[in-house]
Image (spheres, helix red, strand yellow):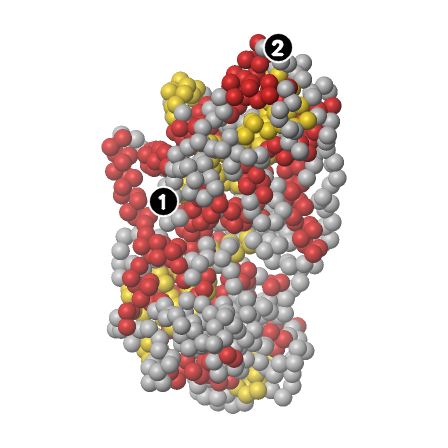
Amino acid sequence: MSKKEKEEKSTDQRCYPVETKNKEGSVCVITERCKGCEFCMDFCPVGALQRSEKTTEKGYHPPEMTEGCVLCGKCEKICPEFAVHIREKGVEDESDEDEEDEKEERGEWI
Amino acid sequence: MSIRKSRDWFSPDYQEQDTDEGVGYGLHPLDEYLREDRIPHIWCPGCGLGVILNAYLRALKDSDIPPEETAVVSGIGCSGRAAGYVDVDSFHVTHGRAIPFATGLKVGNRDLKTTVFSGDGDLFAIGGNHFIHAARRNVDFNVICVNNFNYGMTGGQAGPTTPTDAKTSTTPWGGFEQPFNLPAVAAGAGAVYVARWTTYHVEELIDSLEEALEKDGFCFIEVMSPCPTGYGKKVGLKTGKKTMKHFKENSEKNPDADPSEVALHPEDPDSKIVVGKFVDRDAPTYQDERGKVFGQAREEMGVE
Amino acid sequence: MMEPGTYFMEGNTACAEGAIAAGCRFFAGYPITPASEILERITERFPEVHGSYLQMEDELASIATVLGASWAGKKSMTATSGPGFSLMMENYGLGLMTETPCVIVNVMRGGPSTGLPTMVAQGDVNQTRWGTHGDVGVVVYAPSSPQELFDYTIKAFNTAEKYRLPVVVLSDEMVSHMTEKVEVPPEDEIEIVNRKKPKDDPEGHLPFRPDDDLVPPMANAGDGYGVHVTGLTHDEKGHPSIDEKTQNMLVPRLIDKIRKNVDDILEYDEYKIDDAERVIVAYGSVSRAAIEAVDMAREKGYKVGMLRPKTIWPFPEERIYDLAREGVDDFLVAEINFGQIVYEVERCTGGAAQTYLAPRMGGNIHTPDEIVDRIEAIDRGEIPSFKE
């Protein structure tokens, strides 16, 4: 299945839509990969992420979005577990090159 | 073992291996570089290795190097497990011998962009001799040293970069040896690119990795990393985030520093962890030099 | 490779030339007496044949580099002697575990430790079989002349490529330093074997799933298969899998790889064995004296023959077993050590024949007279059999 379809079907990921002055996108957390290290929360420049009350299957508290995110991508870079990543509308992920048209057609994000 | 008793030791029992898809595989943009059934990795919560691997894969993705021309070699230890997660030709060899193995790989196939990913003990204790000679030869590969100040995998023993006063598993009364200043060792041995960062400095680390991947010659990047399980909890840095905070508050960027002067002095509360890119120079690589000499030899012999 | 013809060549030179003829284009080594001439010859010849050599900082690095180059697709080799070979034990094991084809030449010298650097001994024989930790299956050749050093180095490369393991060429100082006639055949008459390449696509490829001959095809680094190679016990994907079941799948296969293919690998020579009542077992340089001793003993009326293992490992177990039951009364093992192969011989007779040892300390080979004297002493009842 296409990457987009995988994402839509996946229950592994929680995506938080973000809209800033000049960017639109989302911050996605693949919750079951999270080990609760809290690097993303501690080093988000605007403190947009907080510890979720809910736990993963293994008992870790993954991050959840509050507000103020500027889609800087620091959380994605600093996560040791490949659990956090951001999508920004208009910024291609190279692996999606084939699906560019599909995305445009559907017009939606997340 | 007698051949006459032809008892089969080996009896194939192939159960179709279910490809464990791994958690959420394919969702993260770097998943294409990871071996799907190996994620989540074995590193502890708060370990910095994942951050460094993340940075490395990002740098790899942003470079133009095709994955088929990439090789990762690691030694033994937690850092040594990195090779097992990267979905390229990856080699998990014996303790301390990642560098000579990578030398063979690179000299055997010059198209392979080779990176050695290993720890402070693997590279500078048992592997120390190999490190300095590879730097001296200026073989074209990158060495990423994950410096977590101890032998983490085996339970937190002291290593060649452990601060003197730390009470580790093998220095329960405190230590009495001076640790290495890794950038000084690398620069002294002749590395053409020497940088030190911490896992807090992800942006700079990614840039450094991109530069090292581009650059020809022996490139060395030390990355200081939290090890809450093996080391941190013995020195008052019980969690990864505490260690990261420590890196943030106690480091200072100084790219003009002389590598010989960036030794760490954690016993001195005013001293800073100096980070930066200390050496970035050009020099003919091992292969360049060899090509010249062999070319001349062939001319003298009158052969192609 | 060299122009075909007849040459008067030193053993070590012949070894290096054999490697080049076999297609070896990568060498990493460290100087050590009495193997340094191999390095030197390689460094002289490699520019011409477009090979790469590295003089490494120690033997540990040498063997690691050789393994790396093999994974890069090159036929690679190192050469050393006892002290260096001991250093190489760990990575010899890594090569066996990861099924990496390469050749290690060990030119035996007096030991233990620094021992007699410039003099012959045969003290490393059992080490090649048992020196690395864990259970392995090995192949070790014991040439006895410069011609055999040439031929068997080529054969070592072929066996290494065919069965995917580090093969040892176990020379000794005398064979390596003697200068003798070596016939170099034309290139098209030399059989070269290359490693099996995978036939399937990278997608779903299992790098350690063996074929029927128990050898998996080998994808080199850079071929696009993204193999993971580890010294940890691994499954067919090459991923570490640290449990008993995986160990059971992997290690027995590494051992059986050699056992099951023994008919293809095992080699030995016999001399005047048909009516022999006593068989001298000797290898390497000692076999030269032993052949002479057989003739001398025959003149004195003894019915003696010689069995010369050319592969020390796998050892010609079945042959010894059969000879012991077909009229051979005893075996006299002549080796320059205090008994290494003799244990194998004794075990293989299964008690159906006696085993005697003619040891030497190291420094010189047996003389034919010595061996004949030993035979006579045995007959006089002066020498206890080995097990006493």
- Establish if C363 lies above or below C102: above
Q: Residue at x 59, y 77 (%)?
A: A35
Task: Residue B76: give x, y in percent of width and height.
Answer: 51, 60
Q: Which residue is mark 2?
A: C301
Sequence-first tag of 2 and 1: 1
Depth check, front residue: B209 or C305: C305
> In the image, what residue occupies the spot 72% across and 31% down?
C350
Q: Quadrant of residue B196?
A: bottom left
Q: Secondary structure at mark 2?
A: loop
Indicate the quadrant containing the N terminus of chain B: top left, top right, bottom left or bottom right. Answer: top right
Q: Relative to C232, is C366 above or below?
A: above
Picture disc at residue B155: none
Residue at the image position 50 percent from the left and 65 percent from the top: B79
Question: Whole-percent x and y of residue B293?
Answer: 27, 41
Q: Is residue C199 visible?
A: no
> Residue C163, how many percent across, how many down?
59, 38
Residue B181 visible (yes or no): yes
Q: What is the quadrant of residue C348 in the picture?
A: top right
Q: Report helix, strand or loop for mark 1.
A: strand
Which of pointers 2 and 1 indicates the residue nearer the eye?
2
Residue denoted by label 1: C55
Instruction: Establish whether labels 2 and 1 are both on one chain.
Output: yes
